[in-house]
Image (spheres, rainbow, N blue to C red):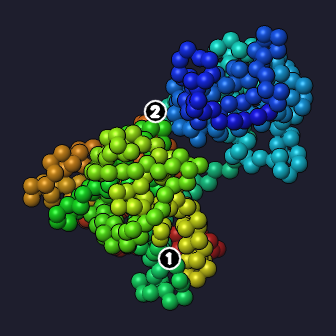
Amino acid sequence: MILFTFSRQGWESWDMTGRPVIREGMPVLVDEDLLFDDGGTPRATVAVNRWLRELPINGGPAASTWWNYARVLRAWMEFLATCAVGVFGSRERLRQALGAYAEHRCAGPLPARFAVSTWNQHMSVLSVFYRWARAEGHATAEPFSYRNAVAVFDGVMVRRQVNTAARRRAKPHTTIKYLESDFADMFVRALRGLAPDGTADTGFRGRNLARNAVIAELALATGLRLAEFTHLLVYELPVLPAAPTELPIPFPVPVSITKGGIARTTWISYSALASAHRYVGLERAADVEGSSWRPAARAGGPLRVSRPDARGGWINGVRTGWDALSAAERRRLVAPDGGSCLLGVRADGGPFTDWNTVFTRTSNRVRARWEPRFPAVTPHRLRHTFSMATMERLVGGYYQQAAQLVADTGGDAALTLYLSKADPLAVLRDLLGHSSVRTTEHYLSRLDMTRVYRDAYERAGMAAGLVDADTRAEADDEFADEDGDEF
C-alpha cells in the first residue's frame, strides 16, 4: 500500500471545474495497482481517505495527527491483506484478524513488535475509524468490544467505554517529566558553556552558546512547544518594558504555528525577555550581518521581507501578517539586511531548527561530568517544567501578591484582575492552550501535583503559625524508621 502527500500544485491542468478542496499536505492511501475501485465498486481506501480528509473538522486539525492516523490505517490494512480479510468484513473475520494482529505485534518478528503504548495508540485510532465507518454506512461491524468504566475529571464522575483490546500498563503514582529549579538552572548554564557553579567550563568548546541558552530560557519561561519557539520570528518578540516588573509579560503565540491552530497568549518573565533582547542585539545581530544565506530552490526559494514590524511586513512585494505564515514559509523568510527572520539562527545567519540534538548533547554532558541523575532533556520537558513552575507560583499566591503590588503602584489593571481572580487551573489552561480545564487537570495529574499542593499547604501553614518547625519535625520523625525493624 502506498502512502503519499496530496498537493494542489498544477490543479488547473487536471480538467477540473474548480480548485480541489482537499487540504494541502493531506496523506492519501492507495493500493499498489493505483486503483480506487473494482468495476465501479469503491475500494476501502476511498472510505479511509474520506475519513482522513474529515479529520480537520472532527477534532484532528494538526497535520501530524493526519499522518499518524494514516500510518496506523496503512499498517492495519496491509496486515488484513495478508490474511485475506476485508477492511469492512464481518465481525467474526475482523476479530479473528485482530487476534492474529495482536500476536504479530506482541510476539512476532522483532521489527514488527509494538511497545504497549504504541499498541494502545493503534487500537484507539482504529476504534475511532471503525465507529466513523459504521456511522457513515461503510462498515456493518467492527473488531472491538468495550467495557464500561468510570473516570473522575475536575471532581465530576464520567462514564466512558474502554476498548478491551488495549493492553494494561503499570501506573506509577507519579512519573517525573520536568526539571526541578536547580536542574533547570544547571541545564541553562551548561548551554551557556558554564559549570553548575556558574564558572566557565574550560573543558567545553561549544558554539552559539548565547543562542542555545536564550532559546531554552524562552521555552522554560513561556511553555512554547518545539515548533512554536523554533519558528518564532525575531519581530514577534514582545517589547521589553521600560522598567523591570514582577508581573509576567504577555506573549502572543502566532496562531499559524500553534498545535491545531489554536490561538493563545502565554507569558514570559522580565529576565527571560531581557536575555532574549540582549541576544538579538548582540550575538544574533553579528550572525545575520551581511549574511548571504538563501533558502534552497527545492524548499520554495526565498521570501524576501521589507519594512517589517511587529504585525507583519512586505513579503515579495505583498503586505502580509506574520500570523498568516506557516512554519515552512517562515523558514524561507529573508530579512531586509540578509539572514533568516527566525529568532534562532546559525552562525551563517540561516535558520536553526535542530533543537533536539542541542538539548540531548547538553543533557549527556551534564550527566557525564557533573550530575549522574540528570535526565535527558527534550523540548517538551521544558514545557512541562514551565507548567509545574507556573502552577507552583499560582497555587502559592506569588503572582497574586505581585499583581497586588503592581496594582498599588499603578500597573497593568487587566492582568492584575486576571491573576487575582482567576482559578490557577484556568490560568494554566490559557497559557498552555488547552481546550478545557479538564485537559489541564489530566495533564497535571501525570506530573507531580501532589507535591505542589503539599508544599503550598505547608508554606501557608508556616506563615499562619499553624505549622511550626517542631510540629513538622515530629511528623517527619514518624517516618524516620520506616524501613527499620522498630514498631
Apparent side of residue 375 relative to residue 196 in the rendered image (left or right): right
Picture quarter with the C terminus? bottom right
**Residue 401: percent from the left, percent from the top?**
21, 58
Check disc 2: other Cα within 10 Å, few if <14, some if 14-19, many if 20+. few
Q: CA distance from mark 1 to mark 2?
A: 51 Å
> Which residue in the rendered view is the most extreme toward the bottom?
202
Q: Is residue 149 left or right of residue 410?
A: right
Res 473 quadrant in image: bottom left
For the point 45% across and 75% down, the residue is 209
Residue nearest the observer in this picture, 304 or 455 = 304
Say which residue appears at 48% left-offset and 38% top-offset: 260
What residue do we see at 32% from left, 41% from top?
A: 319
Quarter the N terminus occupies: top right
Under circle 1, the secondary element is loop
| Circle 1 Cα neighbour tier, 10 Å, few/some/many (<14 / 14–19 / ≥20) | few
Q: According to the image, label 2 marks what residue?
A: 156
Closest to the camera, between mark 1 and mark 2, is 1
Of the residues shown, which amino acid type is indicated by label 1? Arg
Q: Give me the disc on residue 207.
A: 1
Tell me residue 237's x, y (percent).
32, 56
